[in-house]
Amino acid sequence: LELNEVEIFDTKASMRTNFLLGAIPLFSVIIVLVMYKHKYAGAYSGFAYFLYGPVMAWHGHRVDKQRKALLSKKEEEESEISENDNPEKNES
């Protein structure tokens, strides 16, 4: 596929996002299975879906910080390469 660093990062972040989106319903099912004798087990498991907001906000914030750091690192590397390619600018 010949993906660059940013594309690889975005792909992995997307995979983690999808994992988290699937983990919350799984958590809800586990709650029902553990509390199957309780008459409100279904109601309690439904509250697990309220985790979507905080979990996705945390994940989005984390991914955004990491992506910005990657982009700034990439910009620095590109500017160093362009400075090395232009020896006239380095002498002045």
Image: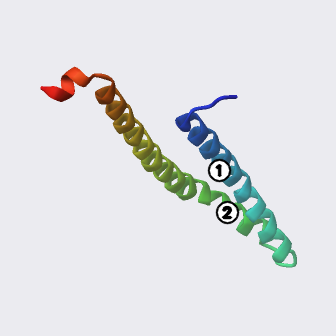
User: Is residue 13 left or right of 31 when viewed as pictured?
Assistant: left
Residue drawn at (60%, 45%) of the image = 13
Give the distance between the C-alpha atoms of the residues marked 2 and 1, in whole angstroms.
19 Å
The x and y percentages for residue 44 are 71, 69
Snapshot colouring: rainbow
Does 37 sit above or below residue 70? below
Q: Which mark is residue 48?
A: 2
Q: The N terminus lies in which quarter of the figure?
A: top right
The x and y percentages for residue 81 are 36, 30
User: Is residue 83 left or right of 61 when viewed as pictured?
Assistant: left
Q: Are marks 2 and 1 in contact (CB under 8 Å)?
A: no
Judging depth in this view, the residue of 30 and 16 nearest the camera is 16
Residue drawn at (55%, 54%) of the image = 53
Question: Label 1: which residue?
Answer: 16
Q: Which mark is residue 38?
A: none
Residue drawn at (37%, 40%) of the image = 72
Judging depth in this view, the residue of 39 and 9 nearest the camera is 9
Judging depth in this view, the residue of 78 and 39 nearest the camera is 78
Comes first in the chain, label 2 or label 1: 1
Amino acid, disc 2: Ala
Amino acid, disc 1: Arg
Residue 10, quarter of the rendered image? top right
Residue drawn at (16%, 27%) of the image = 91
Residue 33, quarter of the rendered image? bottom right
Circle 2: element type: helix
Circle 1: element type: helix
The x and y percentages for residue 41 are 79, 71
The x and y percentages for residue 45 are 74, 65
Residue 35, quarter of the rendered image? bottom right
Q: The C terminus lies in which quarter of the figure?
A: top left
Does 66 sit above or below residue 24? above
